[in-house]
Amino acid sequence: MSAPRVSRESEPLPPHYRRNFNAILAGHALFGVAFTLIHPDSMLPAFVGQLTDSAPVIGLVNTIFRGGWLLPQLVVARLINDKPRKKPYMLAGTSGRLAFWVVALALWAGLARYPAAMLILSFTCVALFTVCDGVSGVAWFDIMARAIPPRRRGRVLGIGQAISGLVGIGEGALIGLVLNQRPFPDNYALVFTSASVLLILATVPLVLIREPPPENADSQSHDPVRGRWLKLLFANPAFRHLMVCRMLIGMMGLATPFYVKHADQVLRLPQGIIGDFVIAQTLAGVIASVVLGIVCERWGSRYVVCAGSAAAAAGPLFALAAHLAGGGWLVQAYPFVFLSLGIINSTWVMGFFNYLLEIAPEGMRPAYVGLGNTIMGTLTLVPVAGGWLLEATSYTVLFGVTAALVATGFLLTLGLKPPPRGTLAEVPS
């Protein structure tokens, strides 16, 4: 596919553009810094692994995290799609950020002496955090789409992710020191306390956003409550194609929760290497954010989607190769798996979500975001399925199946069409 360079000269700037640019940038960066400390691909599975050896239970971390964020979003979209102001819903959703204070306080209080109780509380708090953040996210995407023109979104998202990634490199080093030098559960209590403070700080820029006026849209004809949301899926080929790609790439969740377990129990890498994993993941996120931000701004979000999908396929392929090798440089280079995770995680918003916002009809972005994320919510049991697959077979089968599915998704991303320029996508009649 060709890659025509996109001009931004004709893009009108919405009201309060500079203020909103800075506020969205600051909130995005601070949230990214906090997210490094509670990441469902590394930190949370490692924490749960201290409380249980059950692979399905460890996989449940990712299931709850993804499912809590994705599944309720269609309901949220139905609620807020036609509301003239989305900011109150965005701010209301930030209340869930208090949940990790509860986890941290429980660890300081010694609840980890009772692993079952600690797991139940932790899963409950993770679910509360993700559901509330999903509510906030639907509104945030719509506000961001109105506040930042399409060809400037790569800039704000890329810079925000690069800043959080640079800080995350230092976080990774500190995580390694804390996990190695402090006993459990004090080490994770300190990590989650730090994350809680940062999540509160990340809320302040959201308060400072001045929401642009709503776009003109026929809310009566666009109302997803009236059953029209199914037509969005079946009548919009760009949306359908994108969702098939997202579903296949999302199958990476089969293996993601078990990379730390694999490194520890099979490859016999030291516990402190989790810090190296975080560094690799965040460093890759920094580089990817800068490079792919430029790609997004000049050529469009679909090229970001392709690059991220290729990285997603590389992760399980490398893990499979390291597992089969059993030693040598492949095992020592195992942080490459987390490097690939850093790249794909940097492309979800900049690539997949940005492309979705570009193909969505005006006035229908919350419905598209909510429907797309609810469809992705069907993958919430994938990490648990990965745990069952691992216990029933082997790491060879787990990594091989994951790599095959994700590679298929990558190949399909190569066929994504450019979003319409200068015109808006049509609403299916």
Image (cartoon, rainbow, N blue to C red):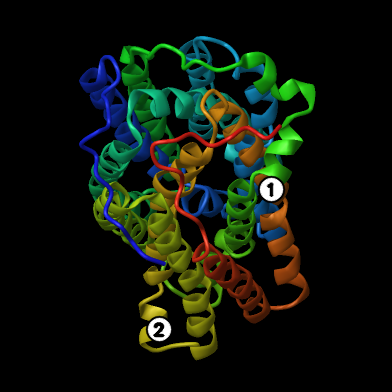
Q: Position of residue 362 (x, y in %)?
A: 51, 27
Q: Amino acid at mark 1?
A: Thr
**Residue 158: percent from left, percent from top:** 29, 44
Residue found at x 60% / y 46%: 239
Question: In the figure, 389 relative to 152: above or below?
Answer: below
Residue 10 visible in the snapshot: yes
Label 1: few (<14), some or many (≥20) within 10 Å? many
Mark pair 2, 1: CA separation: 30 Å
Mark 2 is surrounded, within 10 Å at the Cα level, by few (under 14), some (14 to 19) or many (20 or more) other residues, namely some
Image vertical order of residue 375 relative to residue 141, above or below: below
Q: Residue at horizontal 43%, vertical 66%?
A: 311
Q: Are marks 2 and 1 in contact (CB under 8 Å)?
A: no
Q: Which residue is mark 2?
A: 330
**In the rendering, at what x and y percent does residue 286 appear?**
27, 52
- Looking at the image, tell me whether mark 2 or mark 1 is earlier in sequence order: 2
Which dot marks residue 380?
1
Q: Secondary structure at mark 2?
A: helix
Q: Amino acid at mark 2?
A: Leu
The quarter of the picture where the C terminus appears is top right
Q: Tell me the quadrant of the picture where the N terminus can be found.
A: bottom left
Disc sitting over residue 200 in the figure: none
- Viewed as shown, does residue 110 lie left or right of 230? left
In the picture, measured across the screen, residue 233 lies left or right of residue 3, that is right
410, above or below 332, in the image: above
Residue 96 placement (x, y as % from top left): 54, 23
**Which is more toward the observer, 243 or 194?**
243
User: In the image, what residue occupies the spot 64% across and 44% down?
Assistant: 236
Say left or right for 265 vs 197: right
Marks counted in the figure total 2
Q: Going 64% across and 36% down the picture, which residue do you hit?
A: 68
